[in-house]
Image (tube, rainbow, N blue to C red):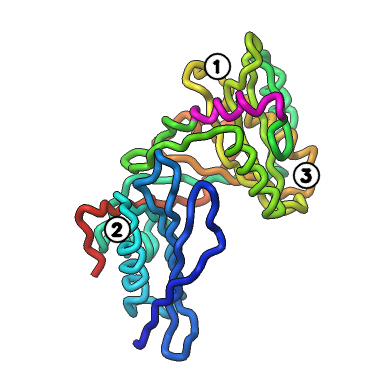
Amino acid sequence: MSLRITPLTDPADGAYGRRLAWLASDADSIPVGTAFLRLFIDPGQAHLAELSLQVHPVERRKRIATRLLEAAVAAARDDGRRCVVAQAGAGSPGDRFLAARGFRKVLTLRFFRLPLADADPAALDAIVERPHPGYRLTSWRGTVPDELAATFAASRRAMDDMPMDDTDYGTVTWDVDRVRAAAKAVEARGEQLHTVAAVDASNGSIAAFTELVVPGDGTGDGQHYGTGVLPEHRGHGLGRWMKAESIRRIRAHCPELGGLLADTADSNTHMRRVNDSLGYAPTHTTHQHQLDLDGVRTG
């Protein structure tokens, strides 16, 4: 098969990462596959690149994916990256492809969905209204209010030790500008960002947070973006408390919303128990693979 790999200019560059892209096309210039490589800029993740690779199902087994992978790996090497990560459905052709080309499985992710029609309002009320001495809940839509911006940015370190198993993930540095930029990016896509936070009543600082993004028209499914509790505030049931309030609020705000999607590491038994207790049902599993660039085989 005559195949051409064309580097593309991707407009998705931003303050915290840039993206490279390649298009695979056949002899008739018909697109048959794509590859995108996210290069993180944050100092804590400057070693990392994230690959997304797609080949049309009828065009598989023609070395298209291998050619795209070679281009992406070469670019990651040239940029001084230490490793490349990629995700594929458990047992899928992509799962087997990555394993056969030097990637190792470093993380198993479980995905869940809560049909909002199945959510029990009385049970949610009971969870939210149960006292949590020393804490109170607050919430906002879109960008964090100015008076909470600094403490919200500081609370993001709650995600630094989230279970990532053997992934060389690094750490993300958050400040006020970054949390505002993230909210504006969601808004620019035409979606809604809803945040619920637990506040330490002793000093007004944010102890924990959970974020939910829903389609702009309030239909379809929403997506949980992250739930984090600062280490010094764990053990008080804040994660379940906030998630229950998030579900309760989104049912009232978006009555046409179908469900809520969540994912978590298989090893994150605490968050999996929280999701189970709130009625989330498993949907599928993916594997995160990692290619360490000190020894690469792509052919």
Q: Are marks 1 and 2 in contact (CB under 8 Å)?
A: no
State the SS at label 1: loop
Q: Amino acid at mark 2?
A: Arg
Amino acid beneath label 3 = Cys
Q: In the current view of this chain or complex, which residue is farthest to the left?
A: 295
- Point out the stretch of residues depicted in magenta: 146-158
- Tell me the mark number nearer the camera, choosing from 3 and 2: 2
Residue 78 vs 149, above or below: the answer is: below
Q: Amino acid at mark 1?
A: His
Q: Are marks 3 and 1 in contact (CB under 8 Å)?
A: no
**Alpha carbon distance from label 3 to label 1:** 29 Å
Distance of mark 1 from mark 2, alpha carbons? 45 Å
Q: Mark 3 or mark 2: which comes first in sequence?
A: 2
Query: Residue 248 at x, y = what percent?
Result: 73, 33
Label whose residue precedes the other's in the sequence (3 or 1): 1
Q: Quickly name the residue at label 3.
A: 254
Question: What residue is pinned by disc 1?
Answer: 236
The secondary element bearing badge 2 is classed as helix
Find disc 2 in the rendering and name its residue: 77
